Image (cartoon, rainbow, N blue to C red):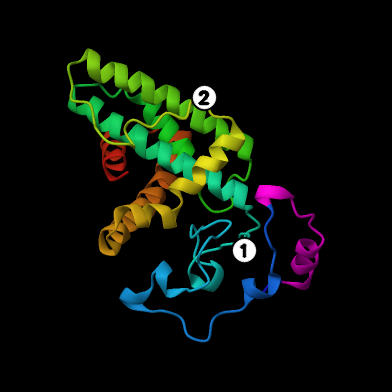
Amino acid sequence: MLSRAIKQAISRTALPAGRRAIAYNVGSISTLPSRLPIGRNMSMAADTTISNPAMFCRQCEQTQDHIACRTVGICGKSPETSTMQDVLMHTVKSVSLWAVAAREAGASADEIKEANSWTLSSVFSTLTNVNFDESRIAEYIKEGMTIKRDLEQMVRAKGGVAPDGDVARLDLSKMDTDELEDFGYTVSIPELQKAMGNDDCFSLVEIASYGAKGACAYAAHCRQLGYVDEDVMTGIHHVF
């Protein structure tokens, strides 16, 4: 249950106009459906209210209806922040593809150091209550595009094999924040699940991604103490 103070704070929040207008329904945030889906039936399709959500975040275990926060985060995260984080994670996947290719082409730990550091910082910023600053998330995305470009050049210079596909070819370098937010709706969890077309495979991808996020949390703290394990980073990039 949300505290009275939080409910009052949300009720006083001015709603944005136009495209980003959303409904802050405090009652629905704290009210569970009479019967929750269980086991293999716990999917987005099980909740008939999910059609065109303002956001779809299941980063933590306290999500709305135990499925996902879809109007505003239980933590207070806005749809705009959630969407930007979706874009950042998509960027992480793109950088990871090129980091794997660079290692396979013979890149040393020192050559891949910047990609390792950026990956840890970026993924850590998407964890629960770490960073709700959309402008900083946009900076991570731009930095990721620069690192991806450098990795591309490295792979080609070393005669490596370039990864293929839309994620590998991702280029967000010329988008402003509004454009990044718009793009984010195309790479949200529901949209990616539709694109994959196989619930079991998508579930595996999601489990692996959140597991890798957890590993990044520990690795990011180790980096702060001056320790980065190349084997760990190799595994993280392979998972993403």
How packed mark 2 is, by other alpha carbons closer than 10 Å (few <14, some 14-19, many 20 or more), is few
| Residue 159 point in image, percent of width and height | 17, 16
Can I make out residue 107 in this image?
Answer: yes
Q: Position of residue 153 (x, y in %)?
A: 30, 16
What's the distance in space between the residues labelled 1 and 2, CA to CA? 32 Å
Residue 197 vs residue 170: left or right?
Answer: left
Report the residue marked by disc 1: 74
Residue that appears at 31% across and 42% down: 236
Query: What kind of residue is marked 1?
Result: Ile
Amino acid beneath label 2 = Lys
Instruction: Pinpoint residue 141: horizontal percent, then vertical percent.
Output: 50, 32
Q: From what the image shows, is residue 179 above or below residue 29?
A: above
Is residue 183 found inside the magenta-colored segment of the image? Answer: no
| Quadrant of residue 145 within the rendered picture | top left
Question: What residue is at 61 percent from the left and 61 percent from the top?
Answer: 71
Q: Judge whether 187 appears above or below 110 on screen.
A: below
Q: Is residue 17 one of those drawn in magenta?
A: yes
The label on residue 97 is none
Mark 1 residue crowding within 10 angstroms, few (<14) / some (14–19) / many (20+): some
Which numbered disc, 1 or 2, marks the residue closer to the eye?
A: 2
Q: Nearer the viewer, residue 11 or 108?
A: 11
Image quadrant occupied by the C terminus = top left
Please name the residue shown 23% across and 13% down the image. 157
| Identity of the residue furthest to the bottom in this view | 34
Q: Main secondary structure of the magenta part?
A: helix
- Which numbered marker is on residue 174? 2
Q: What is the quadrant of the N terminus in the image?
A: bottom right
Q: Does residue 68 lie above or below 129 as drawn?
A: below
Local SS, label 2: loop
Residue sticking out furthest to the front:
18
| Residue 111 place in picture, x, y as percent | 31, 19
